[in-house]
Amino acid sequence: MARLSRTWPCADPNGANKVVRPASGRWESLALLLAALAIIASVTGYVLLRPKHPGPPIPLGWQVRSFDGLGAVDQAIHSALLPAGEEIIWNNNDTGGWITLERAQEIWLPPFYRDAFWKTNGQVHWQLILPGGHLPHAGSDDGHEDDAPAPATSEVSQATQGQGATVYYGAAGRAPGQSAYLLVIGHAHAGVMWANQATIWVHPDPNAPYPGIVKPESLVGKGWRQVIPYDGASEVERVKGNQP
Amino acid sequence: MTVSPKHRAIWRRCLALLMLIPAIALASPTVPLGKKLKIGVTLHPYYSFVANIVGDRAEVVALIPAQANPHNYQPQPDDITRAMTLDALVVNGIGHDEWASQIVKAAGRGTTLPIIQANASVALIPIGGDQGGAKVVNPHTFVSTTAAIQQVFEIARRLGELDPGNAATYRHNALAYAARIRALRAGFMTRFAALDLSAFRCATTHAGYDYMMQEFGLFVRAVIEPRHGVAPTARQLANTVDAIKKANVRVLFAEKNFSLDLAKPIEAATGVKVFALSHITGDTYSADEFEVAMRENLETLAEAIEFTQR
């Protein structure tokens, strides 16, 4: 607070009023100005440098995000492939076998089950390719007949020999803009529980041929892209601000 | 100084116990043999999911009263008391049950209660219709069949980790429950098979049904609420009415058990027919509530599609 200089009353013998200056010599104004500038600079700095609201993670060049990188039909098929993959893996853990496309019809398992969903999502032709098999597995084809070229099963089975992956390959979909699909289940041997892992891949050409080798680098080279689900775990992290 | 053999034995036991303390502290939170897990749930569908997964091997506890509206719920002292006794809590995690974290913290269980995010592995989709160009996550994964099954599998997997002794049973029960949900869906698929779904255009008052629509190859053209639980302004409502007219929408899905205040003016302005779908919130929690509510929803959806064929 400014301290007033002391003046004696009636110091002026004429009795005229005298202007009393603050003892601090008007430094208050300067101090106030500097404080205001400091506040403005701080606020501006915060606005410019504050952490931006975290956006969803950016997929790598060979990946595509299910949430905003896929069309509606691809998104629907991807959503159905996720639980199907989980069920196929559980079934394999329990029985050692794979759910054939015939069996998928019996248990109404989308996206393989030929229902209204299958119909409105392009009537995709699915094929099951088992690891290392030269011959088509019983029920490895969904029996759907159409004009689209489907690869010979023996060819594709041979191509995957020794890779240890089980693949559900979907192609020849008729919906506009739809992709071809791969559900690749990397199979672990020697009784290792919970070691099977499923990945889902799409190709922009709905009639893309079966890629033969289903290792990631080979798939990427042939134009396939891995679908990264934007899942609830990612959303929880995004809301918390932990997403990159 | 000499130590008697008796004292030496006591010292040895004490030392052994001391060495065990870190091991006990670091042990994973698995359930002791013979003890039943007490699993909390936040929303009605999760009560059904968990009850079907665990059968009689665990106890399911609803965190909040059955009649409560999760959209604007305020935690109560009884909820906090319940949270104190839980062994795990199943949450939606991406909407509807944000209040659960307040309850857990207030119960002093913030770091000790395992939280099972039911949607952890569900591929989320955006809210349908025009959201001003933005893609906003739709949290209503439980109003569905396929996304519901994915959640059932996720919950069963996590419960199996917490309770390894019952993991196989949980997995077996989850698969059986998933098969029942798929059978329910397949029944309606047969009914839809003869219908032309390509002409179906719908709008919804609440952005709650995109997952269900996706499973039938259907899409929502417009959503009345601009944000979850937020009423539109007059201008937003006018824009939505325009969008409905332009897209030739004939069906509007409103919320069962909620007010039809939003739906009525739109029905009057556009001539759409209003049908009511359930958000799966009822008066009581039960194991079969999800299946009952979804059967009703699918029945309503079938009626709406059949209406558009006329």
Image: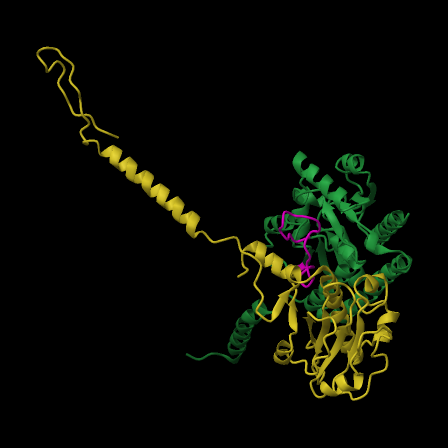
Q: In which quarter of the image is the N terminus of chain A?
A: top left
The residue sitting at the left extreme is A13
Q: Looking at the image, which is closer to me, B290 or B270?
A: B270
| Residue A203 image offset from top left, x and y in percent | 69, 71
| Residue A15 image offset from top left, x and y in percent | 12, 11
Q: Looking at the image, which is closer to me, B8 or B144?
A: B144
Q: Is residue B104 left or right of residue B251?
A: left
| Residue B284 image offset from top left, x and y in percent | 81, 47
Is A243 part of what is drawn in magenta? Answer: no
Residue B105 higher or lower than B8, as above or below: above
Q: Tell me the residue at 77%/40% (across/down).
A: B258
Q: Tell me the residue at 70%/84% (across/down).
A: A164
Residue A87 higher or lower than A38, as above or below: below
Residue A32 higher or lower than A41, as above or below: above
Q: Is residue B142 left or right of residue A107?
A: left
In the rendered image of this protein, which colour is used for chain A?
Answer: yellow
| Residue A112 image offset from top left, x and y in percent | 81, 69
- One can see residue B263 in this view: yes
* Residue span colored magenta: B116-138
Q: Looking at the image, which is closer to me, B48 or B301?
A: B301
The chief SS type of the magenta part is: loop
In terms of image quadrants, where is residue B27? bottom right
Is B133 part of what is drawn in magenta? Answer: yes
In terms of image quadrants, where is residue B91? bottom right
In the rendered image of this protein, which colour is used for chain B?
Answer: green
